[in-house]
């Protein structure tokens, strides 16, 4: 099965970095969104094997996006990439249903390891 990713970040350069990393892992089907509201619309109309989202974005932040995805009943792995490292923020993301959390800046090996762990724990 080919992996299909949804990358959500209001920063175009950050989306490009994540996409470049995903392509280096062999993921070719990548859809991008600039905020949570746009991403949630895309998520509802397609199937993804992973969602990678920023926390702070206009219109709908990453936390609300995670809540929207989980409210749909989806168990898709969601990785949050963010500069938000405060314990309360991390706990809120975990309680909302995020599958993994990675603090920016990150290197490609950390991203690869996080994604491999997320996919390894998903039911087939």
Image (cartoon, helix red, strand yellow):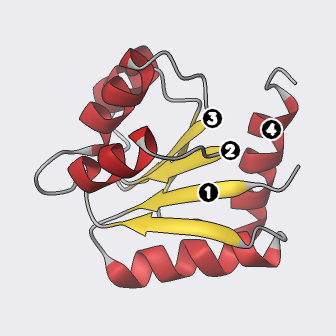
Q: Residue at x 36, y 56 (%)?
A: 83
Q: Which residue matches tag 1?
A: 5
Task: Give the structural element (helix, strand or loop) at label 3.
Answer: loop
- Of labels 1 and 3, earlier in sequence is 1
Instruction: Point out the frontmost of discs 1 and 3.
Output: 1
**Residue 25 placement, left or right of 71:** right
In the rendered view, tell whether residue 73 sits above or below residue 103. above
Q: Residue at x 74, y 48 (%)?
A: 115
The spot of residue 53 in percent (x, y) is 43, 51
- Of labels 1 and 4, earlier in sequence is 1
The spot of residue 43 in percent (x, y) is 44, 44
**Residue 65 placement, left or right of 21:** left
**Neighbours of disc 3 within 10 Å: few (<14), some (14-19), many (20+):** many
CA separation, marks 1 and 4?
A: 12 Å
Q: Which residue matches tag 4?
A: 119
Looking at the image, do the residues carrying marks 1 and 2 touch, with CB atoms under 8 Å apart? yes
- Of labels 2 and 3, earlier in sequence is 2
Residue 49: mark in rendering: 2
**Neighbours of disc 1 within 10 Å: few (<14), some (14-19), many (20+):** many
């Amino acid at each position: 099965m080919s992996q299909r990713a949804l990358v959500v970040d209001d920063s175009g350069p950050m989306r490009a970095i994540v996409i470049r990393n995903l392509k280096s892992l062999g993921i070719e089907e990548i859809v991008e969104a600039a905020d949570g509201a746009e991403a949630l619309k895309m998520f509802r109309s397609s199937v993804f094997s992973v969602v990678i989202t920023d926390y702070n974005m206009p219109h709908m932040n990453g936390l609300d996006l995670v809540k929207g995805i989980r409210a749909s009943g989806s168990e898709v792995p969601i990785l949050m990439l963010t500069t938000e490292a405060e314990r309360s923020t991390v706990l809120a993301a975990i309680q909302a249903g995020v599958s993994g959390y990675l603090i920016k800046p990150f290197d490609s090996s950390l991203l690869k390891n996080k994604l491999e762990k997320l996919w390894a724990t998903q039911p087939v």
